[in-house]
Image (cartoon, rainbow, N blue to C red):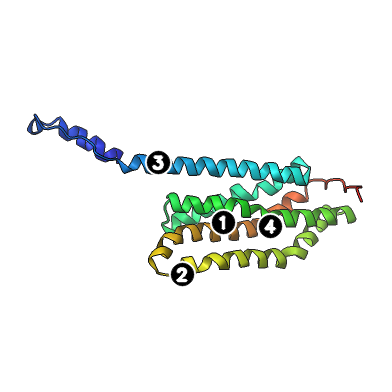
Amino acid sequence: VDDVLTEIGEIGELPEMHGIEIYQMFNQADGILSSLRELFNAGMIGALLSIIVLYIFLRQVSTTLIVATAVPFSLIVTIGFFFFLDITLNILSMMGLMLAIGMLVDNAVVVTENIHRYQRKLSDPKNASILGAKQVAIAVTAGTLTSIIVFLPNVVNESFISQHMYYIGMAIIISLLASLLISLTVIPLLASKIKPPEESKKK
């Protein structure tokens, strides 16, 4: 739209256009850009709130940051796949990313908590990370696949509504698969480098 308006401005200065004025009746780009900005801001606020909630429950900055890394990593992988699948960052795909943000930390929380449980039992942090991640691998995989299956019909269906839901579904499916991969690889690696939080003495 910016290119079109620039071109119209140049056309308006031509001698042939003397006495003719071109003006905009409606510019849809303003509304689209405004919606994208609002979605982006809502996503950032949502991500910040999810990190705050994680800290309230995990009670350790290092553990919270490790779990929170699942969000940016997963979003970067998803946007990379968007490029190869020729999916643009539009209102629907950004809405899918925003909906996925809350689900991206689930696998990381489960894996990290189990690793910390093993770290309290074992002296070797590397072995504790391997065993902790291995024990819950099937559980987090099953949970992730269950969430993916819910959105899968929107991706494979060819109805009019599904064509629009395709962007939301693909954003959620790719980001969830990325978070699963990260929670079973990057998260155990990072968790092996820190001390587990002290176990609560409350009965």
Q: What is the distance, in whole Å, between disc 2 and disc 3 at their CAs?
A: 29 Å
**Mark 2 and 3 residues: CB-CB less than 8 Å, in contact?**
no
Q: What is the distance, in whole Å, between disc 4 and disc 2 at their CAs?
A: 25 Å
Rendered image quadrant of residue 25: top left
Q: Report how many numbered discs are placed on residues in the image.
A: 4
Whichever of labels 2 and 1 marks the residue nearer the N terminus, that label is 2
Rendered image quadrant of residue 110: bottom right
Q: Judge by depth and name the residue closer to the eye, 92 or 133.
A: 92
Q: Which residue is mark 3?
A: 33
Whichever of labels 1 and 3 marks the residue nearer the N terminus, that label is 3
User: Can you tell which mark lies on residue 107?
Assistant: 4
Q: Amino acid at mark 1?
A: Ser
Q: Residue at x 82, y 57 (%)?
A: 128
Q: What is the distance, in whole Å, between disc 1 and disc 4 at their CAs?
A: 12 Å
Q: Which residue is mark 1?
A: 175
Q: Judge by depth and name the residue closer to the eye, 163 or 80.
A: 163
Q: Which residue is mark 2?
A: 156
Q: Secondary structure at mark 1?
A: helix
Q: Residues within 10 Å of mark 4 (few under 14, many from 20)?
A: many
Across and down, in percent, residue 41 comes to 52, 40
- Please say whether residue 53 is visible from this viewpoint: yes
Q: Residue at x 49, y 44 (%)?
A: 39
From the viewer's perspective, is 14 left or right of 201? left
